[in-house]
Image (spheres, coloured by chain):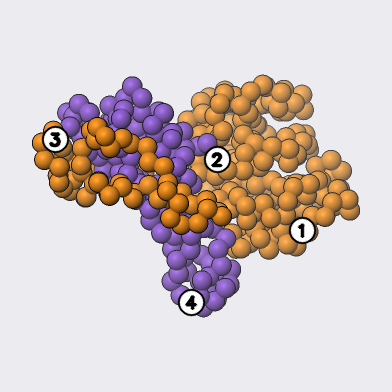
Amino acid sequence: MCTTCGCGRAEVTIEGEGHGTPHHHHHHHGDHDHSHGHGPLGAAHAPGLSEARIIEVEENILAANDAAAAHNRAHLEAAGVLALNLVSSPGSGKTTLLARTAQDLKARMPVSVIEGDQQTSNDADRIRAAGVPAVQINTGKGCHLDADMVHRALHGLTLEAGGALFIENVGNLVCPAGFDLGEAAKVVILSVTEGEDKPLKYPDMFAAARLMVLNKADLLPYVPFDVDKCVEYARRINPEIEVLTVSALTGEGLDAWYDWIEARRREAGAGAARQAAG
Amino acid sequence: MHEMALAESVVSIAEREARRAGAERITSVRLEIGALSHVVPEAMRFAFSAVSRGSLAEGARLDILRVPGRAWCHDCGREIEISALGDACPACGGYSVQVTGGQEMRVKDLEVA
């Protein structure tokens, strides 16, 4: 802590460094030019500086995103469309699962897809090749989708009642966790070639998800992944989380995944009916 | 590095409020960040200094008030404090822990000139 002005900069804890290590302190005290309003009322203990005023704000940092997400959610619910936000780290087989799901479900229900990646339209191309409408969002340097991007992408899709919309988020197990897109549920996909302790390492995502899909189950005989342990870890973070084990490659477990989607779709349809009646 | 996007929201909220109050400059911004929220304070500081350039908040000090993580332990029926999701109950060591607070990410107030 800076003894001149009391600005705390002690949030960084680095394992093995221990307490009492001098932390770096970015602002310059030689020409101490920031005004001194640390207390709630900005008690001016350094006289002679320009008169400062405090403006109370009390606003959620994500308020704008949450408002856009609420708008998307209302729009999707009114249309009777189930929206699922698929999240995972890169390489979990998310796109393979999605392409196969779209292919298998398109005869049973209207399916559409929003693809999020930093660059390329490869994934949307892959989905369109399966005969399913898809819109690609490229986030550039962005590490996650936000509700406004999804709102804009929705304008490029025709939503049909009783349908399912899959939103494939940017491959990243951290950043997408906090951004509500207006989906009915987040689905986190974890492959058995990853560490079974990922729920503990990236808890925010597992806390936010309703379902965890363990993919690449066909590789279980060849990898040391312990399914029970993984589920135990995930439930430590989120006691309510549901779990399915599948292989998007061989098709193992996919019927249970499709049943899960059907159940959510019925919920979405019931919601739309309630809205229409109300 | 989603703190970049969050910092952009902070600057836009701060600029809107400062303009509404007819202020010319934002000298400090106070955030309330829960220990169980999606924000790493150091990343937020870095992002804020980058995205506030050219805005009314350029050069503003960022104060981050940390709110402790709170939870309810179903095993021992106690209100507890945890520092991260997935922590065991400090009283009984169980993992039936339900988060009750410490997830906030708020712009609390601003100091303007």
Residue at 46%, 57% (x, y): give it.
A19
Q: Colour of chain B?
A: purple
The hue of chain A in the figure is orange
Q: Gap between marks 3 and 2, in whole Å?
A: 40 Å
In the figure, B88 relative to B105: above or below? below
Which is in the foreground here, disc 3 or disc 1? 3
Q: Position of residue A132 (x, y in %)?
A: 71, 28
Mark 1 is surrounded, within 10 Å at the Cα level, by few (under 14), some (14 to 19) or many (20 or more) other residues, namely some
Instruction: Mark 4: give few (<14), some (14-19) or many (20+) Cα within 10 Å.
Output: few
- The one of A262 and B88 positioned closer to us in this rendering: B88
Chain under disc 1 = A
Q: Residue at x 41, y 53 (%)?
A: B34
Residue to which mark 2 is pinned: A175
Give the spatial CA distance, label 3 vs label 1. 62 Å
Residue A169 or residue A33, whichever sits in front: A33
Residue positioned most to the right:
A221
Drawn side of residue A190 relative to residue A238, left or right: right
Q: Local crowd at mark 2 within 10 Å, few (<14), some, or many (≥20)?
A: many
Task: Kindly indicate whether the residues beneath marks 1 and 4 are on one polypeptide chain.
Answer: no
Residue B90 shows up from this direction? yes
Give the Cα distance between marks 2 and 4.
Answer: 33 Å
Q: Is residue A208 left or right of residue B25?
A: right
Q: Which residue is mark 1?
A: A227
Disc 3 residue type (three-letter): Leu
Determine which of the numbered discs, if any, sits on residue B77 in the image: 4
The disc numbered 2 marks a residue on which chain? Answer: A
Amino acid carrying mark 2 in the image: Cys
Which residue is labeled 3 in the image?
A: A49
Mark 2 vs 1, N-terminal side: 2
Q: Secondary structure at mark 4?
A: loop
Above-or-below relation of A248 to A118: below
Dot 3 lies on which element?
Answer: loop
